[in-house]
Amino acid sequence: MVEDNVDIFFFILDDMLEEENLSLITKVTKKALQSSVENSLELVEKLYDWIPIIEKPSIKLALYQVIINYSRENGIMTYLAKGLLQSYLIERDDFTKFRSTYASGKGVLLFEDFLTDEERGLMYYKLGVHAYYLSLFEEGLDLCKKALVAGITENRMYANTIYGICNCYYYLGNYIQAKEYLEQYKKFSLPEVKDNAELTEARLHSANGNTYLAISILQEKLKQCGDFTLPHVVNLLITLYLQIKNISAIKEIIELDKKITSKSYVTPVKKAESAHYSKLKGDYYILTERVEQGLNSYFKAAAGYAKIDFISKENECLRFIQGTKAINRLKGQSSTFIKDYYTLNLITPLKNVNTLIEDTTQHQESLNGDMEDLIYLGYGTYFHTYQLWIQDDDSKRNLSNREYELLNLLIKNEGKIITKKQIISLIWNDAADEGSVSVLITRLRKKLGKASTSIQGRKQGGYIFKGS
């Protein structure tokens, strides 16, 4: 294709953008590349450089996909890698598919040698932050460290990478390393650094057992922190108040609700904090016997988690909501009993709250009455679908969220083979491998005890549930 024809192609393409006919734009671009065999690399380069001027993400994504397909077919590895990276950067902004976009984004790693140092640093940084958002802290740590090695020139990105490493170490329980990277982060003269550093120091104090020192720092911070840090400070304070059972202090924070909820958050981590705040409000309302307000807060939290693809957190809130069945069954009981019931059965993640329960005999009697929530698995073993435990003659064993989701999936499809690929898709949203499935199956079988034989492996690589 001569230079004039290339110019004509971009003139036509530019004209089609106004009509936003995605199918036509894609067809014309494919045809232009196919008819430009001798100068295909030149056209791919110009197309790649031209795409950023387009405003609509769907059109940009479609054109990058054309580049990816054409480059793969013709061995143009540099633009295959560049196209995959740009597609990932667009797709990761759809927070409702956050897990699947992380899995697909890691595909860029296969072609990292064809990227520039700057592109490689950006790739590692974006994937590292993505992994951190998904609570994949070991992966996030590895990717962020590789981002530093690859070379990041932009100051804020470099600072965020250091802070990401600090946070990953914190959530992995390595507080010494977290402190070391926090000290590095504090050296950056960016407006958000001071608030972030003080928040992290409070978290480290709490993790090391200095709860009251952490609270005093956060109380002071609450008076002056900006919008960026506010949700983190509020959530950590409420969590610590729940630990020390200072319900009146939580009430004072809840009174700031308008200030806390009036902000519009953009990033996944801020959206997650907003949803977590609603969840904590729900816990508070249940503890103070305002059940309707508590359930409304759980609904709001579940909706918030759904928007950022936090399936396990969303399911946790929905299971709390399903506890409304218990209210209907317990209408004749005293308010104190209802409070005890909800404390233990709806807020089990808050281990400190369990100490509020004294009448365990009465609680056990209530469980025995929940027969509609029990599934008999055989061998004297029962599965409680809302309180997430397995019980047989020997003991009662609590299930994790993923163990529950897997068992529920197998039971609902009794007699049908569920492949490892289906399990990965439904439970991890494609952000896992077959090894993770094997580990989860082993853990679940151990929890099932004598009933473990109800889960049978198949040569095809899947599993089938056969009840008694």
Image: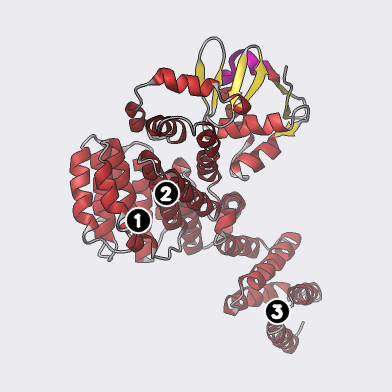
How far apart in space, not on screen, are marks 2 and 3 (Cα)? 39 Å
Question: Whole-percent x and y of residue 179?
Answer: 26, 44
Q: Quadrant of the C terminus?
A: top right
**Of marks 2 and 1, which one's residue comes earlier in the chain?**
1
353 to the left or right of 28 = left
**Which of the numbered marks, if any, corresponds to residue 20?**
3
Question: Whole-percent x and y of residue 70?
Answer: 74, 65
- Residue kind at label 3, given as amino acid type: Glu
Q: Are marks 2 and 1 in contact (CB under 8 Å)?
A: yes
**Which of the numbered marks, if any, corresponds to residue 231?**
1
Q: Are marks 1 and 3 in contact (CB under 8 Å)?
A: no
Question: Whole-percent x and y of residue 110?
Answer: 60, 51
Please tell me which residue is depicted at 55% across the width and 57% down the height of the picture: 95
51 to the left or right of 150 = right
Image position of 134 with respect to 152: above or below? above
Q: Is residue 448 magenta?
A: yes
Q: Quadrant of the N terminus?
A: bottom right
Please tell me which residue is depicted at 28% across the width and 42% down the height of the picture: 247
For disc 2, the marked residue is: 276
Residues shaded magenta: 446-453
**Of marks 1 and 3, which one's residue comes earlier in the chain?**
3
Res 284 seen here: yes
